[in-house]
Amino acid sequence: MQKSYYTQVCGLIEGGVDLLCVETCQDILQTKSALFAIQNYFEEKKTKIPVIVSVTVESIGTMLMGTEISAALTSIEPYDIVDVFGINCATGPKEMEESVRYLSNNSPKKNFVMPNAGIPENIGGIAHYQLSPNEMEHWMKHFVFNFGVNLIGGCCGTTPNHIEKLVQIANEVSQNKTIKEKILSRKYFFPSSCSSIYSSQTFKVEPSPILIGERCNANGSKKFRELLLKDDYDGIVQIGKEQIKSGTHILDICVAYVGRDEANDMKEIMQRFNTQVSIPLMIDSTEVNVIEIALKNYGGKAIVNSINLEDGENRVGKILTLCKKYGASVVALTIDEDGMAKTFQKKFEIAKRIRDIAVEKYNLQEENLIFDTLTFTLGSGDEEFRKSAIETIEAIYLIKKKFPKCSTSLGISNISFGLNENTRNVLNSVFLHYAIEKGLDMAIVHASKIMPLYQIDEVGKELSKKLIFDERKFETIEN
């Protein structure tokens, strides 16, 4: 599809168009293919013209695929080539009001509204549009003067008389400095987010944290692995849906397993999860080509898990390039050429280095960086790791303090590796509590196994706290 769009982009730009409008969009993945083609043309020809993306929201309040306006915005917002984002077709302005209000309050991009002259009515097999030019004027003034809409137009059923009213509104704005300044100074709030094709998920929730489901992992879930080995992709979809029911906000997807074609497995799963799973996905792979296949088959805004500096900048650069091109966030692990960082100072130094590379060299927004300061097990009793939980928590605090736009994440269950199941659940829950206090935003967990503190007995809480903060007491034997 993107090859077909590329041909169109070539013809349109070389034919002299002033801007490109990817409009009447019903499927965000289709929109992304068009944007991919436009990006390629701009990069190859070293040129740039304005780009509008306009989605079509049905009278039920979502796009035809079921996409909420928030999800559409989240998926498209990372694309720097998109100058204007908005809505056209399907309904009249009245039915668009709530979607326009949302964009007014939340979109960082210029806003665009191009409604029909009302909802079409089928009369004798012919579509009739009943909204008068004066009614169109009333609604569009409301959108421009109250919501700060930047571009207006008329779609199906609008006549020269409708468009004349829109021209009058535009002239009124251009001649009124106060109204113009109000529109240009529109305030918005767009939190760091990811999305499926259905809904958007912010990186900050109350109460914290964002829960990332860990059961769609070939190396961490026996059930998932067995289904994968049977090519039972429908069964795998069911595992994803079960995690949603348990309260998971995001699903981590890892299909890497010895003897399997990871690229093919990822394609099969992503094509299904794209339309059959309602929450956003985290793509968990070490292979650059597998990550790209996943991003190509996902309409939402995904999170890539993960990058690190173990091999310097080479692999990091390849993945950051993909994240920028496909509009994804990325998890960054505090690992460099010397290995996994163990002190909070070293963890922060690596995080800063990755942040500088991502933002200054690859032009990724800070909001799309998620730092994982790594968790080591306290279950082994190894002296080297006695203070590892403290170091991890303090690193989270420092990163959040220095880079407040970035997010933080942890694979919680590593802290209790080697202990029995009941003990693990208690230690994981208590450790998560203290990590959240220091600013943790996300946690990769088995959501149903995490317990609120009030459900844990006092002995369990106290023992866990002493282990986490290394509050050992040594008895002295007197002669």
Image (cartoon, helix red, strand yellow):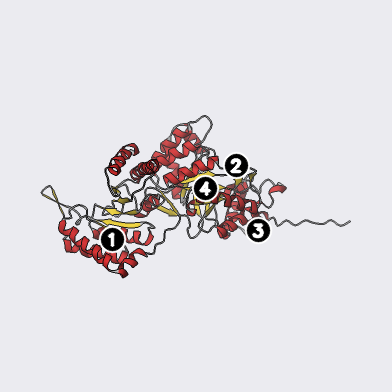
Which callout, 4 or 3, points to the residue nearer the camera? 4
Looking at the image, residue 67 lies above or below residue 438:
above
Horizontal side, residue 469 vs residue 202: left or right: right
C-alpha gap between disc 3 and disc 1:
53 Å
Q: Earlier in the sequence, mark 2 or mark 4?
A: 2
Residue 314: % across, % down: 54, 40
Q: Earlier in the sequence, mark 1 or mark 2?
A: 1
Mark 3 lies on residue: 462
Which callout, 3 or 2, points to the residue nearer the camera? 2
Amino acid marked by disc 4 = Val
C-beta proximity under 8 Å, tags 4 and 1 = no
- The residue positioned 28% from the left and 61% from the top of the image is 97
C-alpha gap between disc 3 and disc 2:
37 Å
Mark 4 lies on residue: 331
- The residue positioned 42% from the left and 36% from the top of the image is 267
Residue 48: % across, % down: 36, 48
C-beta proximity under 8 Å, tags 1 and 2 = no
Amino acid marked by disc 1 = Glu
| Numbered disc 2: secondary structure | loop
